[in-house]
Amino acid sequence: MNIVGFDRRDFGMLVSLFKLNVADRYLGSGLGLIWAVLSPLFLMGIFTFVFTFVFPGRLPGREGAIPYVIWLLSGYGPWLAISEGLSASTTSVVGNAGIVKNVAFKSELLPVVGALTGLFPLLVSFAVIVALYAVSGEVPSPALLTLPITLFLGTLFVSGLGLFLAALNVFVRDTALALPNVLTLLLFSSPIFYPLSSYPVAIARLLQFNPFYVIAALFRAPIIDGSLPPLWMFIYLAVVASVIFAGGLMWFRRLKSFFDARL
């Protein structure tokens, strides 16, 4: 089996690298695993407080703060996964320079491992949402079965962007430094904290094709409304994610022969 240049041994290497990365990132220190849970909880707590008490928001047709908090976290959780995944992917090659220069393996696996690392904040946000579901007494919908599809497409999209940024960061080290500012700009310019209907109609028509919004919307529809997301969103994200991944992979493979001289 060979998928875009990867065979079964590469997938085994991907699993090994992921385990090594998790052990180094979260199990390498006494507070590593604890901080992996507390960090996203802290961020979610801040934004929940701001948009629930300071600038209170409510969902149309829903009473109380809990439905709005679930709506907020079901969009912000995927964003945390995107942000964490892109940050880890961007520094994955430079941060593993010794392995890249001395071990024979496909270094394009490293940004994919970084993208998978971003799933931890998403798991934390889902745990909080499950707890809020239990408190509110809402019954989960069968539409939640679509979440693994969204998860796969979102991870493919982040992996593609990560491949591009990881290769770029080898030659332009300011890429990793500029990324947090760019991500903050994208966060507040995307319909993550605000519903799409709060934007002017002309802008909303454009923003509905923002991949970051589409990912959030695909998570929100089954969690909030218990409904299946629009089919066009799945098709659109599948096309965009595939194109981004293929382009990122070609870019990375074209540049990786020059990595040794720059690491």
Image (cartoon, grey):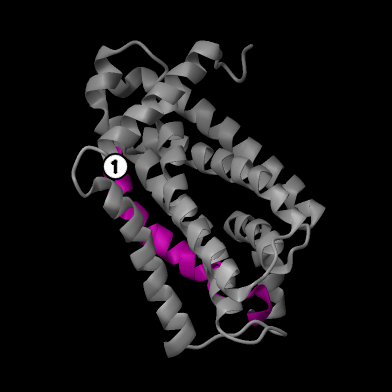
- Report the span colored magenta: 172-198
Residue nearest the viewer, comparing 154 with 243: 154
What residue appears at the point 21 percent right and 50 percent down from the top-left corner? Answer: 31
Dot 1 crowding, Cα within 10 Å, few <14, some 14–19, many 20+: some
What residue appears at the point 68 percent right and 78 percent down from the top-left corner? Answer: 197
Q: Is residue 108 visible?
A: no
Q: Is residue 21 visible?
A: yes
What residue appears at the point 41 percent right and 68 percent down from the top-left corner? Answer: 44
Query: Is the C terminus in the top left, top right, bottom left or bottom right quadrant?
Result: top left
Q: Main secondary structure of the magenta part?
A: helix
Give residue 221's position: percent from left, percent from top.
70, 63
Is 172 positioned to the left or the right of 254 in the image?
left
Q: Quadrant of residue 3?
A: top right
Give the labeled residue for mark 1: 26
Q: Secondary structure at mark 1?
A: helix
What residue appears at the point 67 percent right and 70 percent down from the top-left corner? Answer: 138
- Vertical position of residue 146 compared to residue 27: above or below: below
Question: Hey, what amino acid is under mark 1?
Answer: Tyr
